[in-house]
Image (cartoon, rainbow, N blue to C red):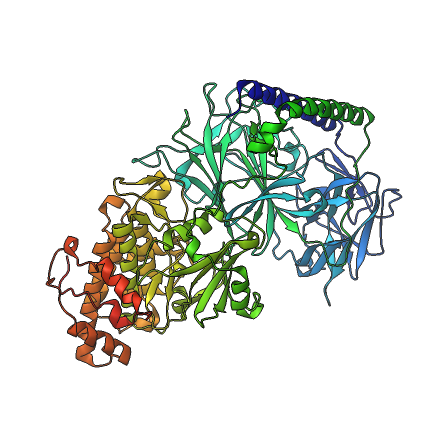
Amino acid sequence: MLSMEKLHRQDVLFTLLLLIYSSSNLLLASGYTLPNKYFINCGSSSNATVDRRNFVGDVNSSSSYFSVRPSDDLKDGNPETGTSPLYQTARIFRKESSYEFRITENGIYVVRFHFYPFLTPTNLTAALFNVRVTGYSLLSNFRVQNRSNSPVIKEFAIPIEVGNFTIYFTPQKSSFAFVNAVEAFLAPEKFVSNESSHITPAGSDGNYRGLESQALHIIHRINVGGPKIPPNNDTLWRSWTPDDDYLLLPGSAKNSKASNNTPNYDPLVATNYSAPIDVYKTAKELNRSYSSSSSFFNVTWGFRMNKNSTYFVRVHFCDIISQDEDGIVFNFSIYSRFIELIYSYGPTTKIGNPFYKDYVVDSDDSSLMNISIGPRSDSPNKTAFLNGLEIMELITRESGSLPAPSKPKKTVIFVMVGCVVGVAFLLILLGVILKCRKANSVESGESSMLLYGGRYLSWITGTGRAVETSSVSSLNLGLKIPFSEILHATHRFDKKSMIGKGGFGKVYRGTLRDDKKVAVKRSQPGQRQGFAEFQAEINVLSKLRHRHLVSLIGYCDERHEMILVYEFMENGTLRDHLYNWNEDCTISTPRSQLSWEQRLEICIGSAWGLDYLHSDSGIIHRDVKSTNILLDENYVAKVADFGLSKSSGTDKTHVSTDVKGSAGYIDPEYFRCMQLTGKSDVYSFGVVLLEVLCARPAIKRSVPIEETNLAEWAMSWQKKGELEKIVDPFLVGKINPNSLRKFGETAEKCLRDSGAERPTMRDVLWDLKYALELQQATTLEEGYMDSTTYAFSYAFSEMPLLGVQSLPSSSFPQMEKDDVAREYDDGSDPTPSDVFSQLRITGAR
């Protein structure tokens, strides 16, 4: 514990730092004025004034600022009424041509291209071309495919040095390029943060540095809770679109608007160049009347992203909702594994002051970025809000090109003098304070954090290095595997050994020195992202043993590595055997050759594993889906991936926690109330049952809107009594109608909106076994079963009954823990017959 004297010293230090930091930023912000160059009216001999910008005609232009290489100009001979003069002419490029600008100041430049294919004998919609600048490819195989009343505007933020800056237009073979207008102007200081929090699908990954030297492609500018903002209402001529099309649950949020008190900018935190006042005057707020059961649910927006890409995300906040000085404290999350606390006020800011937060975000395998807000129980105002959102894709610098040097943009004498004096004073003050607290700091490694205007200022510990908040010292040391053994097993992580890639990292097939086949899951080397999942997986699986849970062989945490080693599952994931699909969920085709009996056996095995988790271990999986059900060489199902699992305890009805899971599988009650129960797993398992039956993903975006969500779509057919119309074509005519009826009823019960009305996993297990018996009766009568089914049925008919027949679900027989241990002692893997050797049910509820 720090003494009160030390705390006082820290407070003084923080205040001085903030003053110095704030003063320098204020001076820098005051030095920006709206630029008057470069704005080009392409293909025109006259200038055009549009939204306070003077676009210079480039035909026979004598401008000393830019030049254009030989090309053709084109004019719309019959423009539509009201068409902007910018879109009545265009420049046509039949071969690679360029605009060259003479840059006089270093910095980040906003570069915009305007494309409007007006009617002309030259069909502008047929143009196919690339656009690039030195070091970056901006547009590839670009085409304005359809003519509309609105232009297509492509916007970029590019670091540019003093000197010549060239934009190249390169037509594809047998085609041409065109452009109606070009903008290239210097952006304000801090238009892009040089350093931001780095977020991956697995969670936080420290800080990302060097953004000011990278180009960005603006993908989305969203005015959350408000109308469209055209360029003439924005300080930097940006366009902002409403958020409604991106809101996943429209009823979960409502629009809010500022009262008579206009939000007031604090130039130390945000300016009118950060976002126009119209963005901060409106917001989407939690609609607490959306759920009758609880006001604790998330509001989520979904944005389509490119795979294997990185994005700069700026999130705008302004508390126009609070009626008192307490403000609002709420959760902000990206994907489901990164959550940050947002305060609507800071030490020097007031309620109603705009501020923003920046993140660098890696895209995940789903090509969908989810951004959410949600209330907190410890906030005096249990709500949440969001005002604006910007998403920009980082553009990879072309190989062979030199990175942009980080030269100062502009020398402002009084700013530099102020900063030097401030830093000198700060160093003297630090020397005095650190001398007083040096001994204690070094020993304790104490660190501090100050929240400022929604931003965290972190302090390095007295030891001079970052403190890792978690350690692996509490993990099961008996499972540790040396890194050298991992290298041997995977042939030094040979690319040929890689069998998969997920949010945590890459998965490799390996063979230990005792010839045991294993799956090796490795986080990105040197990173500590996903440490919580890494630790949870070890803690859970090291304590559990069940034939329907994937076995953890060991782990490695040497050399800053996070590696998990599992038993190898020869037949991969359940999804692999149900359908082919592409990563953005737009196309999926059935591929399964699994019989209905085999699918039921897999569902039963998975249900048994989940029931063991719930009943014996008090653990909620929290990420049940078809990719987390693995199949061994005998198609025995085993539940995997416990990185998100949560202990429910034996004396709790639920666990209050932030929403995590996968789109399409998340329990809507958990989503609304943030209260996790075992019934949340039951809901997710109900979705898996429908995947097994229909051979399609939980979310499919290439179909009509009413068919996108598998659970909703399938249940609409179930309620009509026509579930057979949507089964996997491979199964048509092969399912006993009674078996299908029982299966459909089981899925329907799992997917009930209220968790209290859903069955337990033990009830589900009972009903699935009954559906299998109904199917096997038909199979035995018709005589078309295969050898696997026959072996299973024979073993089933010969096994002891354990004195359980036609009992209620709550009396379902459970395998004793000692029996489980004994079956593993011989080192053999269970066969399909073994899986059900203690299970016999001749009736259902």
213 sits left or right of 518 in the view: right
Q: Is residue 74 above or below residue 777?
A: above
As displayed, is residue 567 above or below residue 416? below
**Left or right placement of residue 674 versus residue 396 in this view:** left
Q: Residue at x 32, y 60 (%)?
A: 690
Quadrant in the picture for the C terminus: bottom left
Of 608 and 147, the residue lying toward us = 608
In the visual, does 626 lie left or right of 364?
A: left
- Is 147 or 767 nearer to us in this picture? 767
> Image quadrant of residue 63?
top right
Where residue 13 appears, x then y in whole percent? 63, 22
Residue 838 is situated, as x and y percent measured from the top left of the image, at 19, 65
Count of numbered circles on the image = 0
- Residue 421, how many percent across, how many down? 77, 23
Is residue 643 in view from this perspective?
no
Q: Mark yes or no: residue 199 visible.
A: yes
Q: Position of residue 406 (x, y in %)?
A: 77, 42
169 vs 757, nearest the viewer: 757
Task: Say which quarter of the image contains residue 580.
Answer: bottom left
Decide which of 740, 625 is in the foreground and name it: 625
